[in-house]
Image (spheres, rainbow, N blue to C red):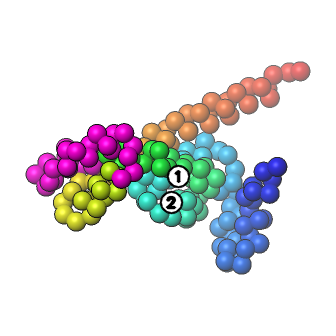
Amino acid sequence: MFDSLRITPLRLLRSRLLRPFAGRLLDRRLWRPAPHTIGLGIALGLFFGIVSPVAQIFLAALAATVLRANLMAAAVATLVTNPLTAPPIYLAAYRLGAELLPWLVPTLDAALIPQLEAFSFDALQAMWQGMSLGWAGLSFAIGLVLIACASAIVGYLVAWLVMRGVASRQLAAAARPG
């Protein structure tokens, strides 16, 4: 059923736009599920999924291609931010940046905080408009980058440990007779 949606290296190379990058796209490390490549792909996907509000998958895939990480892991990990998870992540980023830079940050309208915690899209939009100019945007950006970096590090470590466990179980099963 979903085979028509599955992305393969050969399917990508059928695209005229991607043909010049055939050498990079056919690298086995981009497609093979090894602990390092999966971990790096997840780390890149988490980082760009949190930092970039647009073109997340494109940026993660581009970085994965350059750094030889697993493309599918990078693309899937960008889905960490969606309409349900973005408001709490952005609120946490603002609060983290405000804690680190208290002298730069004007106070956020106190009426918005309960609405943001209740996942109100209107409150998120009001927060964006209020922070687009001034130092509040800087504290938000710093908090967002810090959360993205921490998520990427944790994501890499967890994915690497899980993949190592899977690989060791597969080797143990293959070594057993019978």
Q: Which one is in front, 133 or 41?
A: 133
Q: Which mark is residue 39?
A: none
Q: Is residue 161 left or right of residue 173?
A: left
Q: Quadrant of residue 39?
A: top right
Dot 2 crowding, Cα within 10 Å, few <14, some 14–19, many 20+: many
Q: Residue at x 81, y 22 (%)?
A: 176
Residue 150, position in %: x, y? 38, 43
Residue 55 visible in the current orientation: yes
Q: Is residue 19 left or right of residue 77?
A: right
Q: Which residue is the extreme one toward the right?
A: 178
Residue 22, position in %: x, y? 70, 71
- Three-letter amino acid code at disc 1? Thr
Q: Which mark is residue 56?
A: 2
Q: Which one is in front, 43 or 127?
A: 127
Q: Residue at x 19, y 49 (%)?
A: 109
Q: Which mark is residue 78?
A: 1
Residue 149, position in %: x, y? 39, 48
Labels 1 and 2 touching (C-beta < 8 A): yes
Q: Which one is in front, 113 or 63?
A: 113
Q: Residue at x 16, y 53 (%)?
A: 105
Q: Is residue 150 above or below residue 12?
A: above
Q: Is residue 87 left or right of residue 10?
A: left
Q: Earlier in the sequence, mark 1 or mark 2?
A: 2
Determine if the magenta segment contains residue 111: yes
- Three-letter amino acid code at disc 2? Gln
At mark 1, the secondary structure is: helix
Q: Is residue 140 above or below residue 13?
A: above
The C terminus lies in which quarter of the figure? top right
Q: Is residue 131 above or below residue 168?
A: below
Residue 27, position in %: x, y? 68, 61
Q: Quadrant of residue 114?
A: top left
